[in-house]
Image (tube, rainbow, N blue to C red):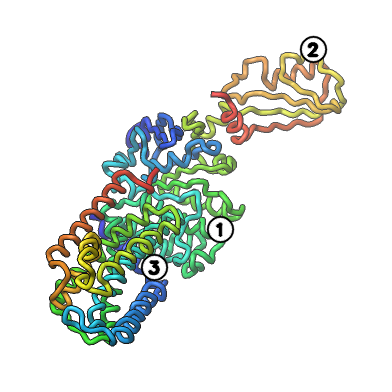
Amino acid sequence: MSKARVILSVEQLSKQYSGGFQALDDINLDIRRGEIFALLGPNGAGKTTLIGVICGLVNASSGRVLVDGHDNISEFRQARQRIGLVPQELTSEAFSKVWDTVSFSRGLFGKPPNPEHIERVLRSLSLWEKRNNRLITLSGGMKRRVLIAKALSHEPDILFLDEPSAGVDVELRRDMWAVVRGLRDRGVTIILTTHYIEEAEEMADRIGVIRGGKLMLVEDKHTLMSKLGTKVLTLRLMAPLTTLPESLNDFDLSLSEDGFTLDYGYRSTVSQPSDTPNNIAALLAALAEADIEISDMDTRQSSLEDIFISLVKEQP
Amino acid sequence: MNLQSVKALYHAEMARSLRTILQSVVSPVVSTSLYFVVFGSAIGSRINEVDGVSYAAFIVPGLIMLMLLTQSVSNASFGIFFPRFSGSIYEVLSAPISYVEVVLGYVGAAATKSTLLGLIVLGTASLFVPMHIEHPFIMLLFMVLTALTFSMLGFVIGIWADGFEKLQLVPLLIITPLTFLGGTFYSISMLPPFWQAVTLFNPVVYLVSGFRWSFYGNADVSIWASLSVVFLFLCISLALVAMIFRTGYRLKP
């Protein structure tokens, strides 16, 4: 990947906590400018530690992080001013007002006051009406919005969203996705960790899977789904079958108990060339030859969640 | 120097005090004024002059110092402890701000609050007790240096504490007793020789004595010894803060 396209580079990053727990193990990762990157992994996989090291909250044991070419330790000012962080926990000064706390964040990141920008951010997150409310009076979802507003207050180039959908309702989640897409359209790079695979599937350009502190894969979302995903063709039969004819033994078929439904599992065409025996045309021809008539058919692709579960369940 | 960030931290801390003005300002002023009324006017009227000044006037510098030490420590310790406790410290740690700037923001605000409180208490005392200040510049210098030093110590305590109990431990069990035994209410020349010698190991004696010198021109120990102790405290506090940030102690895993 060309250096100009890379906005964040993580090189041979490891983190071992004082108790001996290896949270990150030789992580190498390049994030492209302007993409939405979803980092998936089970609890304790190292997602939050990785974000913590990049943002300066956790000391790395070894390795380095470059933010737009700036080392996040020796050039921490240039590196950190490009980053906005929305943490997983709802942490805030409970008695501050929304406007004050968001303005404070902007100042803390070294930016001069800009009430117009703060107003834009608050309006985009439906917080404008709440600007004079104290944080303690807000609901969990509203507090989550405030944390996003704080992270956006200094106009970062990279936005980290650590479990942004934790504890928020469907409406807010959809609103947040719209905000995130809007940010991406304006050139902001988004890195999110999430337990909601649906979120990654919906929004991400690329997916990274981390487990046990190791980055298992980084792949374009569509490539990942076509490489590792499977499809199922469901055929509804005109008459029930009691057993499958021998001529169909070459196909990965399963017959339902009532004998009316045949499921055919196959790889998508990217990883399964169409000239192999296991393809739909050959199956349909074999069914016709065996005088099995079809009344209906349907296909279903495995979701990112299915792929994720199969990945994290694999033994190292 | 990222002045914008320092300003933001400083203003946020000052705003926190304004939000809690009853606790931050009114409470210490009222409680110190009660000392003036009880020890200065009521009991003090039956006590002879101490070191050439009335007892009521004698205890004013000590009481201001008592308030200054406890408020500096508690303001600064709470200022950094609460964001750690609530988790909002993540924002400070991820901001493009150096450790020196973080300390300037938190400690600067705590020291400002304590100094302002000291001046308010001084003004309040002058309503109860007739007094004069012989060296107003040295008095102000002492006040600011003490507020800075003990705010920095409070900052260290706020990082060290892992609960509210520890937060109160040092101010209640160390600072207050040392101040009471440091010549706030008496001149150490009133003690038997053995206890005079023991008292000289109490660092607060030098603070109270030097501060009192700036008011009345006489003190238990020399002004230079007092100033040296303040600077020594300042250096120790600075070294502790530097060590904390260099190692990330209790801030960064």
Of B129 and A19, nearer the camera is: B129
Residue B143 horizontal/vertical position (percent)? 22, 70
Q: CA distance from mark 1 to mark 2?
A: 60 Å
Which residue is label 2 attached to? A246
Identify the image quadrant of residue A255: top right
Give how far apart the Cα atoms at labels 3 and 2 are: 80 Å
Q: Secondary structure at mark 3?
A: helix
Residue occupying the point 26% across, 55% down: B237
Q: Chain ID for label 1?
A: A
Which residue position is annotated with label 1? A140
Residue labelled with disc 3: B16
Locate the C terminus of chain B and report the quarter of the image it occupies.
top left
Q: Looking at the picture, which amino acid does disc 1 mark?
A: Gly
Do the residues bearing badges 1 and 3 touch, measured as CB atoms within 8 Å?
no
Q: Mark 2 falls within which chain?
A: A
Residue A98 appears at what percent x and percent y? 46, 65
The answer to whether residue A49 of the structure is visible from this angle is yes
Q: Residues within 10 Å of mark 3 (few under 14, many from 20)?
A: some
Local crowd size for mark 2, using a 10 Å CA cut-off: few (<14), some (14–19), many (≥20): few
Residue type beneath disc 3 = Arg
Q: Is residue B220 left or right of residue B151?
A: left
Q: Quadrant of residue A114?
A: bottom left
Please name whichever residue, B15 or A122, is drawn nearer the observer in this view of the structure.
B15
Q: Pinpoint residue A35: horizontal percent, then vertical percent.
A: 44, 41
Q: Mark 1 vs mark 2: which is more N-terminal?
A: 1
The answer to whether residue A1 is visible is no
In this rendered view, identify the residue nearer to me: B227 or B183: B183
Q: In whole angstroms, how far apart are the C-alphas of marks 1 and 3?
A: 23 Å
Q: Nearer the viewer, residue A168 or A229?
A: A168
Q: How many marks are shown on the rendered structure?
A: 3
